[in-house]
Amino acid sequence: MKKLFLLVILIVFSLANLIAQEKREMNDEMFEKIKAEKISFLSAKMNLTPSEAQTFWPVYNEFGKKKFEIQREIHEFEHMPDEKFASLSDAEVEKLTDNYISSFGKEAQLLKEYNTMFLKILPKKKVLTLYRTENEFKGHLIREYRKDKKKD
């Protein structure tokens, strides 16, 4: 009986691990798909020359990784479970609010730093086009998401 119980538990944990891994792979796959679509979208709108693209994309990808990490910090705070949120002490609340606000400062500083780099490797108008196009891409993703939801 103990062996059967252990076998059942082992199977349950194995299945749970498999499902979690599959979900991670789906998220990674979706993230890569969005990333590729963004590159295509930005490239088309910015009309980069081959030499501009060669110097721009490595810098932009580095910027994206750093920005993603900062946004992950913000996301973790904004999606904190209600139970954890309710049990925070005043000191923890103060620390979290300070961290939350400083994350936006970090993001602004990062953008300022990379804006300088972008201006060194691209014409000024293309840098401005980059910022406009990033916002257009967000709208594009939202429209695509809504379109997919209507199909379901």
Image (tube, rainbow, N blue to C red):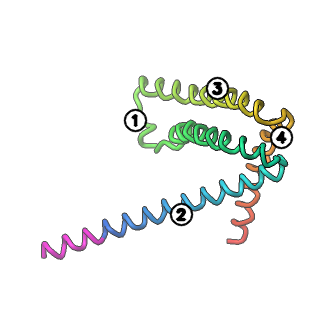
Q: Specify the quadrant of the image occupied by residue 68.
A: top right
- In contact (CB < 8 Å): disc 3 and disc 4: no
Amino acid at pointer 3: Gln
Q: Nearer the viewer, mark 2 or mark 1?
A: 2
Q: Earlier in the sequence, mark 3 or mark 1?
A: 1
Q: Earlier in the sequence, mark 3 or mark 4?
A: 3
Q: What's the distance in space between the residues labelled 2 and 1, CA to CA?
A: 33 Å
- The numbered mark at residue 109 is 3
Amino acid at pointer 2: Met
- In contact (CB < 8 Å): disc 3 and disc 1: no
At which x and y percent is residue 89? 40, 28
Q: Nearer the viewer, residue 17 or 5?
A: 17
Q: Specify the quadrant of the image occupied by residue 34.
A: bottom right
At which x and y percent is residue 106? 59, 28
Q: Nearer the viewer, mark 3 or mark 1?
A: 3
- The numbered mark at residue 129 is 4
Amino acid at pointer 1: Ser
Task: Look at the image and say whether residue 5 sits in the magenta stretch.
Answer: yes
Q: Which residues are magenta?
A: 1-11
Amino acid at pointer 4: Thr
- The numbered mark at residue 97 is none
Classified by dominant secondary structure, the portion drawn in magenta counts as helix
Q: Earlier in the sequence, mark 2 or mark 4?
A: 2
Where does the N terminus fall, quadrant-wise? bottom left
Residue ID for mark 1: 87
Residue ID for mark 2: 26
- In contact (CB < 8 Å): disc 2 and disc 1: no
Under tag 2, what secondary structure?
helix
